[in-house]
Amino acid sequence: MKQVIDGKLYDTETATKIGSYWNGLSTSDFRRVSEELYRTKSGNYFLAGTGGPLTPYAESNGESSWGSSRIIPLSKEEAFEWAQQHLSTDEVLKEFPDMIEEA
């Protein structure tokens, strides 16, 4: 998936995949969400996501809604928050060691 946003090219083919999340629902479920976190060669983070008509990925023409796919740019802090919620501890430690401190 490729998308130009604010003059920057986000491309899942050339970026490094950090991890992924799927809410476990089937493709026929309107609440299904699937997202992958990526880091570009320039160090920018983004989500490549797909979701049904009852998700944040929904699109509407005013009369009906449908699911869609799109890229969402994230700050490093937003990517870290997403990773903490959806990835394993090892994946978070590997990508964001500078943002983690001992309790």
Image (tube, helix red, strand yellow):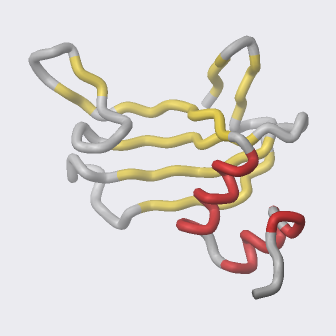
Does 79 sit above or below residue 69?
Answer: below
Q: Quadrant of residue 48?
A: top right
Farthest bottom residue in view:
103
The residue drawn where x is 73% and y is 70% is: 92
Q: Position of residue 15 (x, y in %)?
A: 79, 40
* Number of disc labels: 0
Q: Position of residue 2 (x, y in %)?
A: 64, 25
The residue drawn where x is 68% and y is 14% is: 6
Which of the two residues, 95 or 77, is positioned nearer the viewer here? 77
Q: Position of residue 71 (x, y in %)?
A: 57, 32
Going by the image, does 68 lie left or right of 46?
A: left
Farthest left residue in view:
63
The residue drawn where x is 35% and y is 39% is: 56
Going by the image, does 54 lie left or right of 2?
A: left
Does 46 sit above or below residue 62?
Answer: below
The residue drawn where x is 25% and y is 51% is: 31
The quadrant in which the N terminus is found is: top right
The quadrant in which the C terminus is found is: bottom right
Which of the two residues, 18 or 78, is positioned nearer the viewer here? 78
Q: Position of residue 52 (x, y in %)?
A: 29, 42
Going by the image, does 73 lie left or right of 70?
A: right
